[in-house]
Image (tube, rainbow, N blue to C red):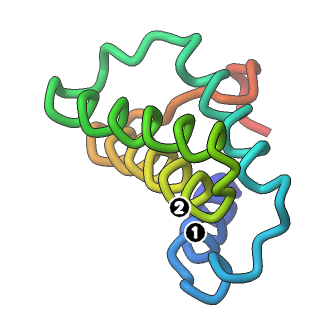
Amino acid sequence: MKSTTLLATAVLLVSPAIHANQSPDSCENNMQELEGIEATDLNYLGEGAEKQIQDHIRQAKAAQEAGDMDACFIHSSKALREIRGVGEEEGMEPNTSGNSQDQ
């Protein structure tokens, strides 16, 4: 069930049509999710991947502060996609729900 959900999420994040039609709170939703992930230990990421993710997060925050919700959504989505992608490659999945049990 997790892989189906993850696949559906990946498809939605990659689609350019989705990027063009996001509601203004999509940036806020992504930023909230990233804040939860940043609060956890990201040591499973390689140094290069962690730096790239932090760059996307910084760009998303700057865009959000400037009121550019499209750029915020794009950069925050890239950061989330990187986090999820690295976790899959390493055989790990970040626990963003706060619940360590599979549902």
Task: Pick the residue in front: 60 or 6.
Answer: 60
Quadrant location, the N terminus: bottom right
Q: From the viewer's perspective, is 28 left or right of 75?
A: right
Indicate whether 98 appears above or below 34.
above
The amino acid type, in three-letter code, at marker 2 is: Ile
Name the disc covering residue 13, or none: 1
Label 2 crowd (10 A; few <14 / some 14-19 / many >=20)? many
The amino acid type, in three-letter code, at marker 1 is: Leu
Q: Position of residue 103 (x, y in %)?
A: 80, 39
Q: Position of residue 10 (x, y in %)?
A: 55, 67
Q: Earlier in the sequence, mark 2 or mark 1?
A: 1
Indicate whether 1 appears above or below 46.
below
Q: Residue at x 74, y 28 (%)?
A: 97
Indicate whether 25 appears above or below 35.
below
Task: Pick the residue in front: 81 or 57.
Answer: 57
Quarter holding residue 73:
bottom right
Label tally: 2
Q: Residue at x 74, y 19 (%)?
A: 98
Q: Position of residue 74 (x, y in %)?
A: 53, 61
Camera-side mark, 2 or 1: 2
Judging by the rendered image, the residue that carries numbered circle 2 is 74
Q: From the viewer's perspective, is 93 left or right of 37?
A: left
Q: Are the residues tagged 2 and 1 within 8 Å (C-beta)?
A: no
